Image (cartoon, rainbow, N blue to C red):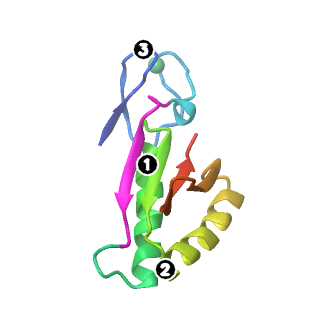
Amino acid sequence: MQKICLDCGMSIDEGTSRCPKCDNCLDSQHDGSIITADIAHQGEHVEEALGKMRVEVDAARNGMGLYLRLIVGSGVIRDEVLFALQGVQADGLIKSFEVEPANAGAIKIRLK
Ligand SMILES: [Zn+2]
């Protein structure tokens, strides 16, 4: 899969952190968009939801979005995801996260 440098438009292999053409830091580039992923409404167990959360965070970090919204519902999955995200943030993989003020069933994660 390829991504595009937002500064010069060069097409770059996923996983590259600096643009070989203009030397911009690709990991900090974003287009301001919000990616939404539902990880809790197909009967997932907690472990399945946590696995999906990690996949979505990894995928979103490789993309150009600024935020990832995880739809987590209101039960134990939300509590476990919030707990797990503390570790993800401590590892420096995300900037911050919060339960959406207007929707307690969604967590908004700032990626960059
Ligand atoms: Zn570039």
In three-dimensional space, the C-alpha distance between marks 1 and 3, rounded to whole angstroms, equals: 21 Å
Indicate yes or no whether the magenta region holds residue 46: no
| Residue 89 image offset from top left, x and y in percent | 66, 57
Whether residue 79 is situated above or below residue 93 in the rendered picture: below
Pointer 2 residue: 75
Residue shown at 60%/71% (left/top)? Answer: 84
Asked whether mark 3 and ligand 1 are closer than 8 Å, the reply comes as yes
Pointer 3 residue: 8
N-term-proximal mark, 1 vs 2: 1
Magenta residue span:
30-40
- Element type at mark 2: loop
Q: Nearer the viewer, mark 2 or mark 3?
A: 2
In three-dimensional space, the C-alpha distance between marks 1 and 2, rounded to whole angstroms, equals: 24 Å
* Total count of labels: 3
Q: Nearer the viewer, mark 1 or mark 2?
A: 2
Pointer 1 residue: 60
Residue shown at 67%/65% (left/top)? Answer: 86
| Residue 61 image offset from top left, x and y in percent | 48, 47
Whether residue 80 is situated above or below residue 4 in the rendered picture: below
Asked whether mark 1 and ligand 1 are closer than 8 Å, the reply comes as no
Binning the other alpha carbons within 10 Å of mark 1 as few (below 14), some (14 to 19) or many (20 upward) gives some
- Element type at mark 3: loop
Q: Nearer the viewer, mark 1 or mark 3?
A: 1
Report if the CB atoms under discs 1 and 3 are less than 8 Å apart: no
In three-dimensional space, the C-alpha distance between marks 2 and 3, rounded to whole angstroms, equals: 44 Å
